């Protein structure tokens, strides 16, 4: 690596850390100001109305935002390289370093190469964050501001959850701590959606690795009654309940946890979402496909935004830098907004693959045109 490359990389890394600290710090500060009362109430409740010391409160807040930074990084990872490149070019232009490089015959493209390579490297950190760090700390990420001590699990009812075999599951209560369903009713339907049979049980407990069903576990039901709705029954005849039976289904405690915490699926790794999608009903498959596609295209868009913005910053005229930075902010801002809108339309107004890849198809020619326009 040449001396000039090391110099540019060093400046870019410093400015990247600076931009990361400013953006993430501002995000945390605003969030803390808005939700500080929830932290204090949670600490007071955890210590029976008398939280022991200021240190406990600071420790709880620090722990909460330490893990929340993993999520914040995913949200701002596209803008930080562009900010770092802007700071780097502004400093080099102000110190007349770009002028010296141009006078020595070095192309502006050559100046941009180390920045682009570093941006690609930071994109790999985004992959590490999404695929390893966030899935490993999913319980911490699920905490709200009022649950800073732990990811609280509360029993909840289940209403008409569709399964991949077209059946519906109801339960008066699901306890995630014991993985137990109470007063279970399963309505089995045909492809047209008409009920064909019912399974009623007083209780169902999830058991891993039981039987030889197509799934790694099943629900061990007690006091079970099976009713065939296609068979005309004597109204005076009551189906005899069974003491126990095992019901195999893709609906497991992990999926129930995802249903109760809708944002949880965003914290899963791509491999976990792929496995989840295999057992999901058609009604939720589009949403999962959208997440799969947008994760990949987001990495490409992050790089495209840098390629679109950096030509504004590589200028021969130091006096035009401020005007170019404003133009860069406007153009990349429009690109970010367009990407956000198209990602929101994916899986609803358009198919997941079209909504995810359309920004790439739109902005790749723009990036090529912007790079071709650099005056070297």
Image: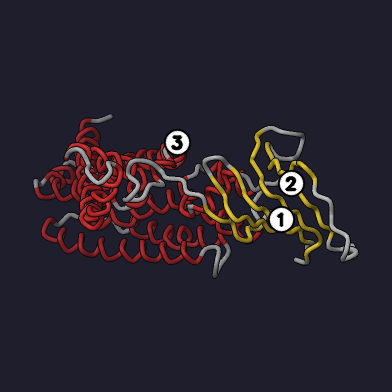
Per the rendering, the mark at residue 186 is: 1
Q: Is residue 260 visible?
A: yes
Report crowding for label 3: few under 14, some 14 to 19, many 20 or more residues within 10 A (C-alpha).
Answer: some
Residue under the point 54% across and 53% down: 259
Q: CA distance from mark 2 to mark 3?
A: 38 Å
Report the mark closest to the observer, 2 or 3.
Answer: 2
Residue nearest the viewer, comparing 221 with 55: 221
Res. 9 image quadrant: top left
Per the rendering, the mark at residue 136 is: 3
Provide residue 126's location: percent of width, then percent of height. Answer: 39, 42
Residue nearest the viewer, comparing 95 with 344: 344
Q: Secondary structure at mark 2?
A: strand
Per the rendering, the mark at residue 70 is: none
Q: Secondary structure at mark 1?
A: strand
Res. 34 image quadrant: bottom left
* Left/right of residue 356 with respect to residue 223 in the rendered view: left
The number of callouts visible is 3
Report crowding for label 1: few under 14, some 14 to 19, many 20 or more residues within 10 A (C-alpha).
Answer: some
Q: Earlier in the sequence, mark 2 or mark 3?
A: 3
Image height check: is 98 above or below 282? above
Disc 2: which residue: 223
User: Label 1 near label 3: C-beta < 8 Å?
Assistant: no
User: Label 2 near label 1: C-beta < 8 Å?
Assistant: no
Residue under the point 42% across and 60% down: 363
Provide residue 55's location: percent of width, then percent of height. Answer: 18, 37
Provide residue 81's location: percent of width, then percent of height. Answer: 29, 47
Residue lying at the far left of the rendered structure: 95
Q: Earlier in the sequence, mark 3 or mark 1?
A: 3
Residue under the point 38% across and 57% down: 367
* Left/right of residue 188 with respect to residue 206 in the rendered view: right
């Amino acid at each position: 690596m040449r001396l000039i490359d090391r110099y540019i990389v060093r400046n870019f890394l410093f400015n990247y850390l600076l931009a990361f600290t400013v953006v993430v710090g501002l995000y945390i500060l605003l969030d803390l100001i808005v939700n500080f009362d929830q932290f204090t109430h949670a600490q007071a409740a955890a210590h029976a109305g008398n939280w022991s010391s200021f240190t406990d409160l600071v420790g709880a807040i620090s722990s909460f935002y330490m893990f929340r930074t993993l999520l914040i990084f995913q949200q701002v990872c596209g803008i930080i390289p562009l900010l770092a490149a802007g700071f780097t070019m502004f400093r080099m232009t102000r110190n007349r370093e770009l002028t010296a490089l141009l006078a020595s015959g070095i192309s502006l493209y050559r100046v941009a190469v180390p920045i682009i390579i570093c941006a690609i490297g930071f994109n790999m950190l985004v992959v590490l964050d999404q695929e390893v760090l966030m899935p490993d700390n999913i319980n911490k990420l699920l905490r709200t501001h009022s649950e800073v001590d732990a990811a609280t699990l509360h029993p909840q009812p289940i209403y008409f959850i569709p399964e991949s075999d077209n059946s519906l599951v109801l339960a008066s209560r699901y306890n995630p701590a014991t993985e137990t369903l109470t007063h279970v009713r399963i309505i089995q339907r045909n492809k047209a959606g008409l009920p064909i049979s019912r399974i009623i049980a007083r209780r169902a407990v999830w058991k891993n690795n039981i039987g030889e069903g197509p799934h790694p576990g099943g629900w061990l039901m007690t006091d079970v009654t099976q009713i065939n709705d296609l068979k005309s029954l004597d109204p005076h005849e009551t189906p005899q309940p069974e003491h126990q039976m095992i019901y195999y289904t893709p609906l497991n405690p992990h999926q129930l946890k995802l249903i109760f915490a809708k944002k949880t699926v965003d914290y899963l790794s791509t491999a976990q979402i792929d496995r989840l999608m295999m057992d999901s009903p058609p009604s939720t498959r589009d949403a999962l496909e959208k997440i799969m596609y947008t994760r990949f295209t987001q990495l490409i868009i992050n790089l495209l935004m840098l390629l679109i913005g950096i030509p504004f910053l590589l200028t021969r005229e130091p006096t035009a830098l401020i005007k170019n930075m404003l133009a860069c902010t406007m153009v990349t801002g429009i690109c970010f907004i367009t990407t956000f809108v198209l990602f929101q339309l994916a899986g609803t107004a358009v198919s997941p693959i079209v909504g995810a890849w359309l920004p790439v198809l739109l902005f790749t020619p723009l990036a090529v045109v912007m790079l071709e326009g650099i005056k070297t």
